[in-house]
Amino acid sequence: MSFLTNLWALTLNALRDRTSTFFNFFFPLVILIIFGSVFSGTYSQSTARVGFVGPKLPKIEGVNYEKFQDLSVLKKAVLTQKEDFGVSLNGKILKIYLNPSNMQSNNYYISIGKLISKEINKTEGIVSMINVKRTEVSFSGKKFNYLNSLIPGILALSIFSVGIFSMTAGLAHLRDKKVMKKLWTTPISRWHFYGAFIFEKVIETYISILALFGIAIMIFGAHYTVNWFEFTILVLSATFGMMGIGMIILLFSPNAKVSSEISSAIYTVMMFFSGVYFPIKIMPPFLQRVAYTLPLVYITDAMKYVTSIAPMPTAKFYLIVTIMFVGFALVLMGFSKVFKTE
């Protein structure tokens, strides 16, 4: 049986594998749409409901005021979330009343309170001696938001899921069902099969990455300057690296169920501690040390580099690529080990 015949058979098998298809494409796509929708315009188009006690407050764009005669009533309105937050002005003191259950939004509400204070000072003729002006210095000279930085991380996470689950889901089932034992009784070449399996997963990864990238650009208007050569070798090498990790999991797992559970646990850890969704620098020091042992951290950084989001020394990029290519050797050695008794 030729290499192309093996490749065609494995491609059809991959298309029928719903679990693999979900984790390789649809799950990253759902994450992309959810986070993209949230962070593509967070607070920019929202209107804050602000209750106040005291004199009339200056108009602020995106703020709807409601006057309260009694402070206790205002606090109750904030507590029951009828108002996003409350403000009281007493002489030179502007107090902000926040609901602690709105922890994720309270920093935004505090910034509105500061803006109100600034506008009040202007009406009183008080001018700040020093004004803070924000200037962004980006790697490519373009302006980026959180969503632009998030998308390369989602692409890296997709590479991770394809590599890991292709070994611990697809290949584990072939081992458990003794499919390979039957195949080896035919004229099929083992290395044709191994090569076709690896090639199919690499192509599957690249297509899913391009599809996610295209959807991100079309839906959210994300813009990047991509070095396609480095992008391609990164996807290729990272896929090999993640397949190598998947092969290690497979070698130490008695069956497909255990290997998939281990992979899912590792996937969850990677998702939250690799800097894809949350910056590593905000973590406690001991968690930062843990994070920098995870390969997805470096794939994410490299993906940001090839999409011109963040700088990286060229030597470091190619070191990451070289280390990831070691996964290819692990996969080849693992094939012989996994199917040694078949």
Image (cartoon, helix red, strand yellow):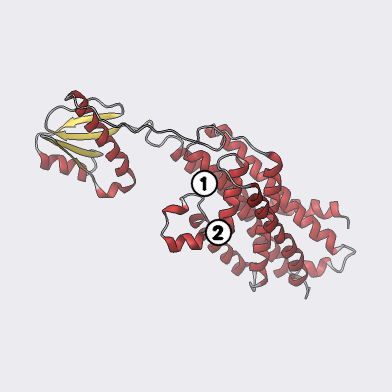
Question: Residue 159 appears at what percent x and percent y?
Answer: 63, 51
The three-letter amino acid code for the residue at tag 2 is Tyr
Give residue 31's mark: 1
Q: Is residue 3 left or right of residue 154?
A: right
- Asked if residue 14 shows in the view, the reply is yes
Quick one: quadrant of the N terminus?
A: bottom right
Choose the circle earlier in sequence order: 2 or 1: 1
Q: Nearer the viewer, residue 218 or 19?
A: 218
Q: Which image quadrant is residue 319 in?
A: bottom right
**Relative to 242, does residue 56 appear above or below in the rendering?**
above
**Relative to 216, does residue 325 appear above or below in the rendering?**
below
Residue at 55% across, 59% down: 267
Quick one: quadrant of the C terminus?
A: bottom right
Question: Residue 139 appears at what percent x and percent y?
Answer: 55, 38
Q: Label 2, on which residue?
A: 267
Q: Give the SS element for disc 2.
A: helix
Question: Residue 226 appears at what percent x and percent y?
Answer: 64, 37
The three-letter amino acid code for the residue at tag 1 is Ile
- Using a 10 Å C-alpha cutoff, classify the residue at mark 2 as few (fewer than 14 neighbours), some (14 to 19) or many (20 or more): some
Q: Give the SS element for disc 1.
A: helix
Q: Residue furthest right?
A: 187
Q: Nearer the viewer, residue 275 or 124?
A: 124
- Asked if residue 17 shows in the view, the reply is no
